[in-house]
Structure formats: C-alpha cells, structure tokens
Image (spheres, rainbow, N blue to C red):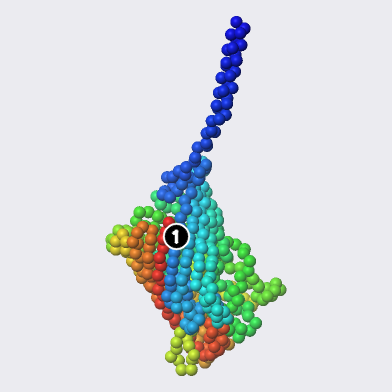
Amino acid sequence: MKLVKSLLLGSAAGLIAVGGAQAADLPVKAKAVEYVKICSLYGAGFYYIPGTDTCIKLGGYVRADTIFGGSGDYAFNYSTTAANGGSNNRLTNYYYTRARMDLNVDTRTATEYGVVRTYADMIFSYDTLNVTGSSPSAFSAGQPSLGLYHAFIQFAGFTMGRTVSIFDAPWQSYPAGGPDTIPGGSNHVTGINQFAYTADFGQGITGSIALEEPTTQSNGQGNLWNTSGFASPLAAATALITGSSYGSSDWGGTRSPDIVGAVRVDQAWGLAQFSVGAHNLHAAYYGATEPTGHPSDKWGWAVQGSLSIKNIPTGAGDSLNLQAVYTDGMSKENFQVLFPATFFMFSGTGVPGAYQSVGLAGVADGVFGAGGSIETVKTWGVRGGYTHNWSPYWVSAVYGGYAQLKYGDASKTLICANFAAIANAGATCNPDFNFGVVGVNTVWTPVKNLAFTADLSYSRLDQKFSGTITAPAVATAAKPAAVYELKDQNSLTLMLRAQRTF
C-alpha cells in the first residue's frame, strides 16, 4: 500500500513539474492595443486621445499669396518707416509674396461642470521683405515670422487667454473677403489677451463681458500724441513727413484693461450684435522725467452694431454683412489693428515747383501738450459685404468700408503749431482724414477644401492738409528735401491666393 502511494505521489509531482515547464515555455500574452477612436460628441474630426476621455482635433491650412500694387499681405499701397509701398519709386515692391501654414489644436473634455475646452492657433509665415533707402540690400533676404493668434481655455462660460475680442463682428474686418485694411469696424483677428464670460440665455441669445489687454494685440493701441515730445517744432515737423507722427506716442504703463461687453442674437435667419467698450488713456509724462508732470487719465469708449442676413432671396447660401461703429478715444475699434497707425503716400503733382505730392494720416486715441489735458479723438465708420454663390464651385463678393477721423480743436492747435515749421505760404493744416475701400473678389473651389481667390480692391486716402510744404529728406523712402504738394492719394491692389484647408 505504501508502494502504491509513493507511485501516485511521484506521478503527480512529475505531472506538475512537466506542466510548470510547459507553462514557462509559453509566450506571455501581449497587452491589448489601444486604437484611436472617433469622438462624435463635438462634430467631425475629433478623436479620443488614447488612454483618456479627452477629444482632440487638428486643423489648419497652407496658403500661398501674391499681392500686386500693395504694401505687404494684404494691404493698400502705403509707406511707413518700415515699408515702402507708398513711396512709389525704385524701392517699392511691385509685388509681394507670402507662404503660410496655420495649425490649430482643439481639445475638449466632458466633466460634471460642463465641457473643458482648450484651443490654440499658431501661424508660420515667410514674406517678401521691404526695401528701404537705409537698407537697399534688404531684397536679398526673406522675412520669416511666427504668430500665436489663439491660446485659451474655456470652462463654465469663462474664456481665459488669447482670442478675438467679443467687441468684433464674427467676420472681423472681412465682411465678404477683402484686404486687412478695411476701416469701419473692429478687428482683433490676430488675438488679444483677455478674461471673458459669456452667458447663454437660449434661442441663440448670448451676453458677454470681458477684460481685454490692448497692449497684447497686433499694432497695439492708437497713438496718444504728446505734441511737446520733440526737441523743437522743426523736429516735430520732420517726424510728420517721415512717419506721419503728430507727436511722440506717449503711453504710460498699464493701469486698467479695456472693459468690453456684447449682446448677440444668432439664429437661422442670421445674427445681430451690439457691442460697447471702454478704454483707459494713461499717459506717461509731459517731458522725459517725473518732475515734468503728466496729464490726468481719461476714458475713451466705442459702440458698434453688426447685422448679418443669411440665405437672402438672391440664392442659397448668399449673405449680407453690415456694421457701423462710433469711437471717442478708442480709434482702433474703427481703424482696426491691421490698419497702419501712421502712414504716408507719395505720387505725382501738377503744382509748379513741387517735386511730388504726399498724403499723410495718423490714427490716435488722444492728444495733449505740455501742462494740458488729454483731448480724445473721435471717429465713425461703416462697412459691409455681399456674397453670392453662383454654384457649389464658384462664389463672388463685393465689399466696402468708409471711416472718418477728427481731431478736436485744441489738438489741431497743438499739431498745427509744429506743422508751421515746414508749411509754405497758403498751406492749411488739418490732421483729420477720411479713408475708404471698395472691392470685388471671386473664389473657385474645384475640389473640397482647395480654393483659388482673386481679390481686387481700391483704397483712397482723403486727407485734409492742403497747399505745399518744404519737407526734409526721408531717408527710408529715398525722398529728397524738397517742396511737396499735400494731396489725396489712391491705391489699387490685387491679391491672388491658393489655399488648402485641412
């Protein structure tokens, strides 16, 4: 009996040993592969980030532009100290080109408090470089640039970070396409840092309020001219012709963000929006040091109305976009952030003894002189566009914008005291100006998300200076010291674009 037990136990131990050996020889089972899954919660293009409950969408475009008769991409033909479009001489580029890639990243996560969203939009561009008289070899190199147009977090109605202003109409400054320099309304398409809250009242009705930092937007704020900021009236007059500066732009440090609010109705027929904004004008000093004193702060403001009508009787998908704006000390909500803050334009003249003609313009929020207070600058403007769909492949549009800027009487007295240093007999000083743009475009989309655009625009500067001036040389524009006629100026610009959106 003992022998039988020993045999059984020995056999069992042998089987266990063999089984263990066989198990050790088997391959270890691989971890299951986590495939990327489609996220259908937020529309097409979203996918779950593997191993998380966060959905992500990548998008953007690649664009190639050519501009004829403009000043960069895509603007009218003007000159500043850094550009020579409006010089209309051998330093002027007859055409500009741009290659650009836009990449945006959108993430969303559902939580018990609602959706948490992050969004970033990054721009990578390579542009034609402007030539100046002080840098005649500039054409030998290109001009790469990076941009961050959006970078924000949204949660429970709050938006925190960088994005467009709630003051803007949804189409920014492009009511039906067109250049970056259409006046008549706000445009923060390159982004502005802000803290905003939006309340949804249902049926497409929303209300928003935001604190926005104007120094973080492209082209900053409008100028705050200190007319005593130059060493002499002649120096001020020199700045006038070389950069359309009516004083030194004498902003102090930040004290208060812009306070902005908007109410919008967005429904199937279109949308209507009313926007308001308040802007703190905080100057530095009358002179270069603290003991020279400073003017008291002043608040500027702006109001804007926007209206979009969709699917109008002319055809399915046709639309009409309109807006109007009035500003008092907040001029960049009319002459928007991509419009030059100061510029000049040269052309021919019929005045005997004059070398050429020139038009001058400067956009400002306010003006002050030594010992005086800030006087705000007032503007108004309108713009609109109509888009018509000929077929699923062809779309055409017409658009336009017009704006007026007026300096106060005290401001004109201060500015014109400096202007007198270069004015000839019979010349009149008035820094006010009007600016208008009209244009047409056609877009051909042969396949989905691939578009070819031709856009032709005409711009006109209606400046209020008159007569002639004896001006100093403008080195950056290769203009000599000479007599110049003060005259309105025109610009005709054509943009050709190819764009692939993904």
Q: Position of residue 370 (x, y in %)?
A: 64, 78
Q: Amino acid at mark 1?
A: Tyr
Residue 139's place in the image compared with 473, above or below, is: above
Q: Looking at this view, is 242 or 293 the one in front?
A: 242
Residue 277's place in the image compared with 32, above or below, is: below
Q: Is residue 326 visible?
A: no
Which element is circle 1 on? strand
Q: Position of residue 361 (x, y in %)?
A: 50, 78
Residue 130's place in the image compared with 27, above or below, is: below
Q: How many marks?
A: 1
User: Few, some or many C-alpha atoms within 10 Å of disc 1 (few <14, some 14-19, many ≥20)?
Assistant: some
At a point 47% along the width and 53% down the height, the residue shown is 58
At a point 48% along the width and 83% down the height, the residue shown is 89
Residue 287 lies left or right of residue 129; in this view the side is right
Q: Which residue is mark 1?
A: 61
Q: Position of residue 188 (x, y in %)?
A: 49, 63
Residue 215's place in the image compared with 95, above or below, is: above
At a point 58% along the width and 68% down the height, the residue shown is 281
Q: Position of residue 128 (x, y in %)?
A: 50, 72
Q: Quadrant of the N terminus?
A: top right
Query: Hey, which quadrant is residue 4 in on the image?
Result: top right
Q: Quadrant of the C terminus?
A: bottom left
Q: Is residue 221 visible?
A: yes
